[in-house]
Image (cartoon, helix red, strand yellow):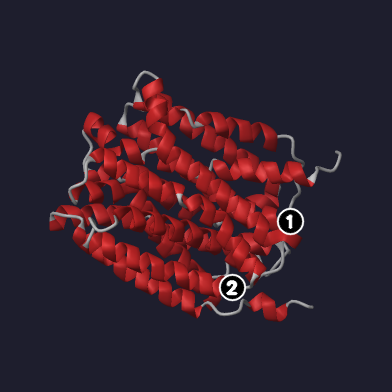
Amino acid sequence: MKPVSRALLMLALVLAAINLRPGITSLAPLIERIASELSLSRGLISLTTALPVLCMGLLAPLAPRFAVRFGLERTITCCLGLIAVALLLRLIGHSSVLLIGSAVILGAGIAVAGPLLSGFIKRHFVDHVGRVVGWYSFSMAIGGAAGAVLTVPFTQALGDDWSFGLAAWTVPAIIALLLWLRLPSHAEPATTGTGSGLPWGEPRAWLVTGFFAIQAGMFYTMATWLVARYHEAGFSLLYSNGLFSAFMLVGLPSAWLLPWLAQRFDMRQQLLVFCGVALTLCLSMITFQPSVLPELWAMLMGFALSGSFALSLVLPLYEVHTPLAVSRWTAMMLCAGYCMACLAPILAGLGRDLAGDYQAPFMVLCGLAVLMTVIAWCLRTPKVAADQPS
């Protein structure tokens, strides 16, 4: 088979990344309507967000094994197929069982694809890691923002049926799948890297995982309950949705900009600390003074959360050398990180039910933002920087 051009590999990466978030974020603007029509409680409807995140955590450790057995590119192709199937199932999603089942299938596809796409970057773009991860995370942000902003217009254009609006995201998944079917697949030798397991005994791997877990938990909590928090604070539903759209859209530039700055000026740790401090400030304002400059804090929070996610994707790439080792560090980060993060939207919903408002769970989020800042401060110069030959 002929060698694949760098441009085609980059396009494949971008299209795959775009499809990693719409299946989750597309539910946010319709979640109250779906809960009402299907007679679901807050706890049950939050499973549509929490279950994919849990699957992304539980199944991430399988990613390196699949890469060894079937090849990196072919496994990613199969994951895109799973994502397309899950989204297509939502065409007949007027059932809580089907809707939650599609969330599980979606999470399975994302869980395995995520760490392998990091290995894909390490293999094909080793000389441009920061820039390519910037485009990767930027593409994920585009997909997430598009899911949040465009699902309601899609729903209205398709007969005002929310199942059609959710299933519309099958189209970009199929486009990505068709392109990935053209890529040759390369198997990973089982002896590559630092063993066949995940780096559970590495303290730095736990720091990376802890940072990732907190930022992911915050993102999915905001994707589930931010509109409800603003609406409870006295804003109209239309205005609350507008603030949520601003929160999602402003993350687009930071998803590309922060990884580029991190590589260009060697300031990963400083940017991680900035994101933690910014999130602490924004959550404090949304918790205690939501009516004071709400647009500013929504946009700054979107900028910091999207940037912190992009930076967390970069971290394993600088910790270890080989594509499979990167996949293993990323798999651990996603496994433990998402398993912890999936609890955040559920606990926030339960906290609201127990306390009677969203202020109490958002106060807990403020404390987590402080912890995230401390972890960022602890992430000093990566191990690989000292180990790599000059």
Say above or below: 155 vs 268: above
- Nearer to us of marks 1 and 2 is 2
The residue lying at 59 percent from left, 73 percent from top is: 267
Q: Nearer the viewer, residue 326 or 228?
A: 228
- Element type at mark 1: loop
Instruction: Give the percent coordinates (x, y) of residue 48.
Output: 35, 42
Q: What's the amino acid at mark 1?
A: Phe
Instruction: Give the percent coordinates (x, y) of residue 262.
Output: 60, 67
For residue 10, the mark is none
Say above or below: 331 vs 90: below
Q: Which residue is mark 2?
A: 267
The residue lying at 74 percent from left, 41 percent from top is: 8
Instruction: Give the percent coordinates (x, y) of residue 138.
Output: 56, 50
Mark positioned earlier in the residue sequence (1 or 2): 1
Q: Is residue 293 left or right of residue 136?
A: left
For residue 125, the mark is 1
Q: Nearer the viewer, residue 305 or 13?
A: 305
Mark yes or no: residue 384 visible.
Answer: yes
Whole-angstrom CA distance, mark 1 to mark 2, is 21 Å
Mark yes or no: residue 92 visible.
Answer: no
